[in-house]
Amino acid sequence: MDDKELIKKARNSFNAKKSKAEILEGFQKRGYKLAYAEKIIAKAKRPKRIAIVILITAILFFSLTFSAYTVFSTNEKVQIKNPLSGFKLFSAGETQNTDGELTNINLEDIEITPEYISFILNELEAWQLHKNPLTLEDPIINFKIEEKTFYSEIKNEIKTYEGLSENADIQFETTKKDLVEAIISNNSKEIFKQSLASGNTQVEIKANEIELASKGYLKLYETLQS
């Protein structure tokens, strides 16, 4: 047999759970010298060792890169003005507000703009999201509010645009009423979480788990579930 056939035979023996000593004994019975048999066995085991080394190296590289990016990330919450500050949601049949502190506004009179989406995501702590440390892609979140659509990119701040992004990681779908009630509330995060819990607001996962984890979505998930 040539070297390739002997290496293949040694690999098959390892796969059959034979020990190195048993394989060496088999080579010697066939008249091969011990040094040559050792060389063949070393070559037979090499690909597996290389694969393991590459895997360990990749895991260490990803872990160190992710850890370093997380440690040195400088994202901080930016104060975004509440677009409904100073207003009180008013419905037909309710008594008009007379305390002079808040201005009544009807739901029908409110036009949802990108500022509304940036504000609610900021309150939900989406500002903690960060680039994928390997691909450097920014987190993107889609928002559907009935017939209106928006997408937000999270960089050093949250920037929102009209339309939907094909590269979104997740997508929220909610009603105008639930969104406005969350924004106009003194505790926007809790009101939005209640809408999620009731099913009025839905979340659709667009990206895979690795992509979501690499961008810090676990923190956002914990915020929405706590």
Image: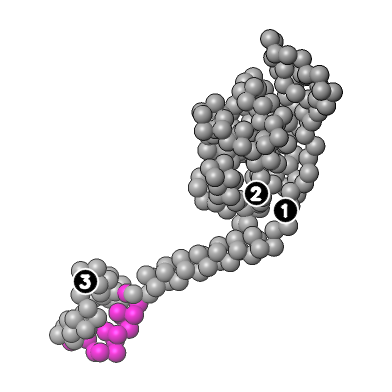
Q: Name the N-terminal-most of marks 3 and 2.
A: 3
Residue closest to the eye, 38 or 20: 20
Is there CB contact under 8 Å for labels 1 and 2?
yes
Q: Which residue is mark 1?
A: 75
Amino acid type of the residue tagged 1 in the rendering: Asn
Measured from the top left, where is residue 208 in percent x and y? 51, 45
Which residue corresponds to the image point at 62% horizontal and 21% vertical from the top-left?
146
Q: Which residue is mark 3?
A: 17
> Is residue 41 one of those drawn in magenta?
yes
Within 10 angstroms of label 2, few (less than 14), some, or many (20 or more) residues?
many
Within 10 angstroms of label 1, few (less than 14), some, or many (20 or more) residues?
some
Measured from the top left, where is residue 155 in percent x and y? 72, 47
Q: Which residue is mark 2?
A: 129
Q: Which residues are magenta?
A: 31-44
Seen as rendered, the residue at the extreme front is: 99
Which residue corresponds to the image point at 65% horizontal and 22% vertical from the top-left?
176
Amino acid type of the residue tagged 2 in the rendering: Leu
As drawn, is 192 to the left or to the right of 33? right
Q: Which picture quadrant has residue 221?
A: top right
Q: Name the N-terminal-most of marks 1 and 3.
A: 3
User: Mark 3 falls on what kind of element?
Assistant: loop
User: Mark 1 falls on what kind of element?
Assistant: loop
- The quadrant in which the C terminus is found is top right
